[in-house]
Image (cartoon, rainbow, N blue to C red):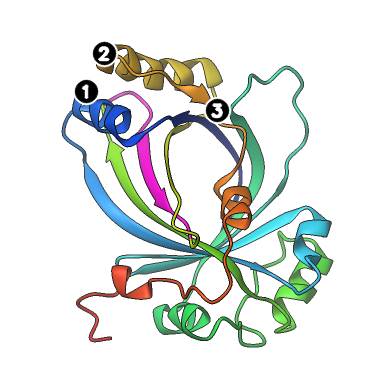
Amino acid sequence: MSASIEVETKFSIEGEAEFRRFLAAAGTPASVRKQLNGYLDGPGGELDRMGWMARIRLVGDETFLTLKGAAPEIRGLPDGVFRALEIERRLPWADAASCFDTGTVPRGLLDPGPEAPPEVRDFLGSGRGSVVAWSLTIRWTFRDPGRPDLIADETWFPDGSRDFEVEVEWDDVTIARRRAEEIARAAGVVLTPQTMTKHARANRHRQSGVPAPIEAVTRGRGR
């Protein structure tokens, strides 16, 4: 289990053609992976009202429970910078996958540990939460020695919509912005500061009756 202050600088890219040009300019990725993200809450939006996001992520053979909440405020951060307290722990793969299969979360499965506020721990442990929204992302990770990783995401949502995003997780926002903007200039691509988290976008594009495409990240596991 880990807890830390996360600082992400994010940009949106308008359209697939521009996104493909950005990928080409970024070079050879260190990895390309699919990740299925399930966002948890109660029927009354209990976690959202507490100011917390809870997510189950399936990627390859790894599964994680991630919580994000408000971090101490820093004034003067530029647009597109998201700062949060992040708490993360691994989950048993079969248990995490079952949350997508059934939409429900077994009582006692999601204990985020003592770093989370008591009310958040109580809610997650109660079994009242469920997967209320999801997104499926293809993530390209680009590495350059001595510099922060550059992430490029293509994300699908249940209503059929899709978007494109670039992010750099680094405490020094100036360095993070420079990392993304250098590639964008080389590609002739316009970066727009992101205004919404993936969690917020997944909630915007929710659609009842559309199951999470768990098969997209479970091939080879005999499911």
At 52% from the left edge and 80% from the top edge, which residue is drawn? Answer: 99
How many discs mark residues in the rendered view?
3
First in sequence: mark 2 vs mark 3 = 3
Front-most of 6 and 140?
140
Q: Residue at x 77, y 36 (%)?
A: 72
Hey, what amino acid is under mark 1? Ala
Q: Tell me the crowding category of disc 1: few under 14, some 14 to 19, or many 20 or more residues within 10 angstroms, Cα based.
A: some
User: Which amino acid does the dot numbered 2 rest on?
Assistant: Ala
Q: Is residue 1 visible?
A: no
Q: Which residue is mark 2?
A: 186
Cβ–Cβ below 8 Å for labels 2 and 1? Answer: yes
For label 3, the crowd category at 10 Å Cα-Cα, with few meaning under 14, some 14 to 19 and many 20 or more, is some
Residue 140 in magenta stretch:
no
Residue 25 circle label: 1
> Which residue: 75% across, 71% down?
121
Q: Is residue 205 left or right of residue 214?
A: right
| Rendered view: 86 above or below 150 | below
Disc on res. 53: none
Q: Is label 2 or label 3 in front?
A: 2
Q: Amino acid at mark 3?
A: Asp
- On the image, the x and y values in percent for residue 172 come to 53, 21
Indicate which disc, 2 or 1, sits on the residue closer to the N terminus: 1
- Front residue (pair 169, 99): 99
Where's residue 161, x and y in %? Answer: 45, 51
Secondary structure under badge 2?
A: helix
Quick one: quadrant of the N terminus? bottom right
**Range of residues picked out in magenta:** 145-157
